[in-house]
């Protein structure tokens, strides 16, 4: 059994390659085409119309008596979080590059993600049929920009030399001028590939089916099978989709144990039954199966409270964690408006989409009566517009993107609230908020003894932190602060459940109202891939954008250059178009959130409040008691 993920920079031919793998293995009768909307792994109506992969899609084929489950992922950077989540499912990967364009900006980001996850990878240099294709040049670019451990399977002498440097027995034979047997080379390459010390490279043309059989054999030979079953159940949800017939589908990789239909499992702290299990099929509809065993990937129906990245069973048995904090987080927020009278329908449609993509971070601007969502870029907005129209029958218009800043404090501040009326209620809190270094996140401390404040109320306060910190005085989320509870008081009769959850945001805002607040702007890690002649101009642009060049490298012929930079997001909102014009479409860049830094003093941006401001105590308490529409717990 093999579980693999296929990744590429957009337009490198990834989906076409997936089609050829399925066809060559006999899993499908006819090769689908992206341009005509017939690709088997582009299953959403919008994917068929637009010729762009939006969601990860799985299919199963057999080759050399091995079952191969392949996951085709989106190539566009606006959907990079979807791709990153998919990396929690496979044991191996195929990274596709164009033999003409070679290593592109997104290629490098994908390879870095594979390397960080320690996923053995085969490199496939595609589009050998195109004019200007040169696999040896691309392999040189790979060694310059990605890894020196790339080794061509089409050059036996280079393969022997490469492996001899990493294997003592082969080195001895090599120095003596002796030949190595094909089996010796194969076994040495298997060991090196499994250890991510070698990246076998092949070439071909997915469009013409060239090199596809060799790739299938390389997948079976060099990528690892699933680890042995360790008995206890351990699984990971890597995607959530909605099917018209089956409803919500959780796409799950089982690493250990067995999942069976009708099993009851703890999902997000709630016991839920599996109503149906399905294995992948090439057409995407799947087929019923009574169980999913260790090493298998499939779809689970029946779970309501499920989201991508969720661990099931014994998390200690999972091979790698999914750190949501390092996913390519959105740095833009937009407002969305629907036809009059359909505002609530739009909001609830976005909530459904958020179950599939948690990074949408859906909110509601009570002041303007608009839904707000977080996004990665323009292509995602186009896809959302199309999805809302075709799936929900909603015509939506988006406002201008706004930068998602964050907030912090520059000096310690204290806040106090006595939530005593209208009865019944009783919750008194005194809180201190202190600044911490950039990148620290949130620290919480409650040194009160159970006698001073019962443990159940201390836990309520800690659980209320996300609610209390989601919007500060400027409307942005607070970060890089330490929250300390200095005093807490309850009443044996008048304190009711949730009183301390209601009270904490009022105490926090009372502290923040003292001043010493600062905006933090997102800083992006920007990786440029450029024609060599454009490097100087782009370096100058980076400096004008308050950016910092971290590293620059070139190919040996100086034809291509790579540049790593840190640039404030606010400065480069529209730079992609400038770069396209400057390089004649030959340059590219990928962006990833690096962190936050103090925004310039001239920045006066604010974010609309999603619910009643806790400083407006009367309205806030009414909203908390559901006496006003919206409440305080809405997004």
Image (tube, rainbow, N blue to C red):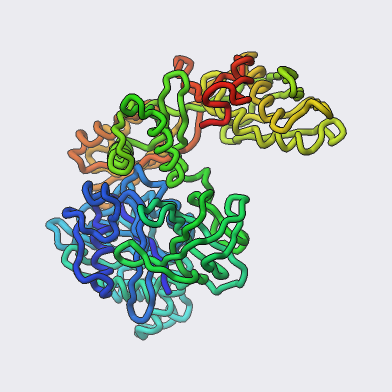
Q: Residue furthest left?
A: 131
Image-based side of 473 in relation to 496, left or right: left
Q: Residue furthest right?
A: 451
When the figure is inspected, residue 493 is found, relative to residue 23, above or below; the finding is: above
Q: Is residue 550 visible?
A: no
When the figure is inspected, residue 575 is found, relative to residue 608, above or below; the finding is: below
| On-image quarter of the N terminus | bottom left
Q: Where residue 513 sits: x, y (%)?
A: 62, 15
When the figure is inspected, residue 186 is found, relative to residue 47, above or below; the finding is: below
Q: Where residue 296 sits: x, y (%)?
A: 46, 69
For the point 35% across and 26% down, the residue is 341
Q: Where residue 592 sits: x, y (%)?
A: 42, 40
Q: Nearer the viewer, residue 466 or 134?
A: 466
Image-based side of 297 in relation to 212, left or right: right
Image-based side of 261 in relation to 100, left or right: right
- Picture quadrant of residue 335: top left
The total number of labels drawn is 0
Q: Where residue 277 sits: x, y (%)?
A: 46, 65
For the point 31% across and 46% down, the residue is 76
Q: Nearer the viewer, residue 505 or 12?
A: 505
For the point 55% across and 74% down, the residue is 228
Q: Is residue 493 visible?
A: yes
Image-based side of 135 in relation to 540, left or right: left
């Amino acid at each position: 059994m093999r579980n693999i993920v296929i990744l590429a920079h957009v337009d490198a031919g990834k989906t076409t390659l997936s089609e050829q793998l399925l066809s060559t293995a006999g899993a499908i009768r006819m090769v689908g085409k992206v341009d005509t909307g017939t690709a088997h792994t582009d299953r959403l109506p919008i994917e068929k119309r637009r010729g762009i992969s939006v969601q990860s899609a799985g299919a199963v084929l057999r080759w050399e008596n091995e079952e191969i489950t392949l996951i085709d992922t989106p190539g566009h950077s606006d959907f990079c979080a979807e791709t990153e989540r998919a990396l929690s499912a496979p044991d191996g990967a195929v990274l596709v590059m164009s033999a003409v364009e070679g290593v592109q900006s997104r290629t490098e980001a994908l390879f870095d993600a594979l390397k960080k996850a320690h996923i053995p990878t085969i490199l496939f240099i595609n589009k050998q049929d195109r004019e200007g294709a040169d696999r040896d040049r691309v392999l040189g670019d790979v060694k310059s920009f990605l890894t020196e451990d790339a080794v061509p399977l089409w050059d036996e002498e280079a393969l022997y030399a490469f492996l001899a440097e990493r294997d003592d027995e082969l080195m001895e034979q090599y120095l003596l001028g002796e030949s190595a047997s094909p089996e010796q080379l194969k076994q040495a390459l298997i060991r090196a590939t499994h250890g991510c010390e070698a990246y076998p490279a092949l070439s071909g043309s997915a469009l013409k089916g060239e090199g596809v059989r060799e790739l299938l054999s390389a997948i079976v030979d060099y990528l690892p099978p699933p680890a042995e079953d360790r008995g206890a159940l351990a699984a990971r949800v890597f995607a959530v989709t909605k099917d018209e017939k089956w409803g919500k589908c959780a796409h799950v990789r089982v690493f250990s144990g067995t999942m069976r239909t009708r099993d009851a499992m703890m999902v997000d702290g709630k016991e839920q039954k599996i109503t149906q299990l399905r294995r992948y099929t090439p057409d995407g509809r799947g087929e019923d199966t009574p169980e999913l065993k260790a090493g298998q990937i499939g779809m689970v129906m029946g779970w309501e409270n499920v989201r991508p990245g969720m661990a099931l069973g014994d998390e200690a048995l999972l091979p790698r964690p999914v750190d949501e904090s390092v996913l390519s987080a959105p740095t833009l927020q937009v407002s969305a408006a629907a036809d009059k009278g359909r505002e609530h329908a739009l909001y609830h449609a976005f909530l459904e989409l958020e179950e599939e993509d948690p990074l949408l971070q859906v909110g509601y601007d009570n002041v303007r009566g608009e839904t707000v969502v977080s996004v990665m870029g323009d292509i995602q907005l186009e896809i959302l517009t199309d999805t809302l129209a075709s799936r929900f029958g909603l015509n939506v218009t988006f406002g201008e993107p706004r930068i998602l800043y964050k907030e912090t404090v520059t000096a310690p501040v204290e806040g106090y609230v006595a939530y005593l009326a209208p009865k019944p209620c009783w919750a008194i809190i005194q809180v201190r908020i202190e600044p911490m270094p950039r990148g620290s996140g949130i620290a919480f401390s409650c040194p009160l003894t159970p006698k001073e404040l019962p443990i159940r109320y201390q836990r309520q306060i800690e659980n209320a932190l996300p609610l209390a910190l989601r919007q500060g005085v400027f409307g942005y989320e607070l970060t890089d602060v330490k929250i300390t509870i200095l005093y807490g008081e309850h009443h044996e009769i008048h304190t009711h459940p949730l009183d301390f959850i209601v009270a904490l945001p009022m105490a926090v805002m009372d502290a923040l109202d003292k001043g010493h607040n600062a905006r933090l702007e997102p800083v992006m890690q920007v990786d440029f891939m450029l024609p060599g002649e454009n490097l100087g101009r782009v370096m100058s642009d980076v400096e004008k954008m308050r950016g910092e060049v971290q590293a620059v490298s070139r190919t040996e012929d100086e034809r291509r250059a790579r540049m790593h930079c840190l640039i404030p997001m606010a400065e480069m909102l529209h730079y992609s178009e400038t770069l396209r014009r400057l390089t004649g479409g030959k340059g590219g860049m990928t962006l990833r959130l690096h962190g936050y830094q103090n925004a310039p003093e001239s920045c006066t941006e604010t974010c609309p409040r999603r619910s009643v401001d806790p400083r407006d105590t009367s309205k806030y308490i009414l909203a908390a008691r559901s006496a006003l529409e919206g409440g305080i717990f809405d997004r």
